[in-house]
């Protein structure tokens, strides 16, 4: 009897990127909020958003929810946030 052993691991993907510039203040900016869909992530992000709004006069906010915890943000939602927001935060729950 023989066994076939499969190794599901892969080498790390090497990428490079430059961080986006960060604004000095949030005053007058539109804030994007990405909810990853985990339990309590919506409550956590609402608390963060309320705290930020109390400290800075935001122009507005755009909130989106990922369709699945295990997948990235769909391109159409990323484009929506990029077109409407100057700052975006993402949150997790549990």
Image: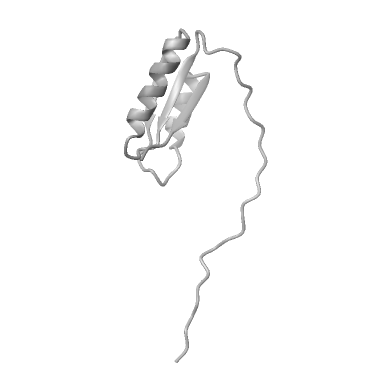
Residue toward you, 25 or 68: 25
Determine the image quadrant of residue 65: top left
Residue 27 point in image, percent of width and height: 51, 9
Residue at 44% from the left image edge and 37% from the top image edge: 73
Q: How many marks?
A: 0
Residue 82 showing in the rendered view: no
Work out whether 94 lies above or below 8.
Answer: above
Residue 53 point in image, percent of width and height: 42, 13
Residue 46 point in image, percent of width and height: 36, 23
Snapshot colouring: one colour
Work out whether 39 lies above or below 32.
Answer: below
Q: Is residue 42 left or right of residue 30?
A: left
Placement of the C terminus among the 4 image quadrants: top left
Work out whether 45 lies above or below 39.
Answer: above
Determine the image quadrant of residue 25: top right
Residue at 54% from the left image edge and 63% from the top image edge: 9
Residue at 38% from the left image edge and 43% from the top image edge: 69
Residue 86 showing in the rendered view: yes
Placement of the N terminus among the 4 image quadrants: bottom left
Residue 59 point in image, percent of width and height: 45, 9
Residue at 42% from the left image edge and 17% from the top image edge: 51
Q: Extreme bottom residue here? A: 1
């Amino acid at each position: 009897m023989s066994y076939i052993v499969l190794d599901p691991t892969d080498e790390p993907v090497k990428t490079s990127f430059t961080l986006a510039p960060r604004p000095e203040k949030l005053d007058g900016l539109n804030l994007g909020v990405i909810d990853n869909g985990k339990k309590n992530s919506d409550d956590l992000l609402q608390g963060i958003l309320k705290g930020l709004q109390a400290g800075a006069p935001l122009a507005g906010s755009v909130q989106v929810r990922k369709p699945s915890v295990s997948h990235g943000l769909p391109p159409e939602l990323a484009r929506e946030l990029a077109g409407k927001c100057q700052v975006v935060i993402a949150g997790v729950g549990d």
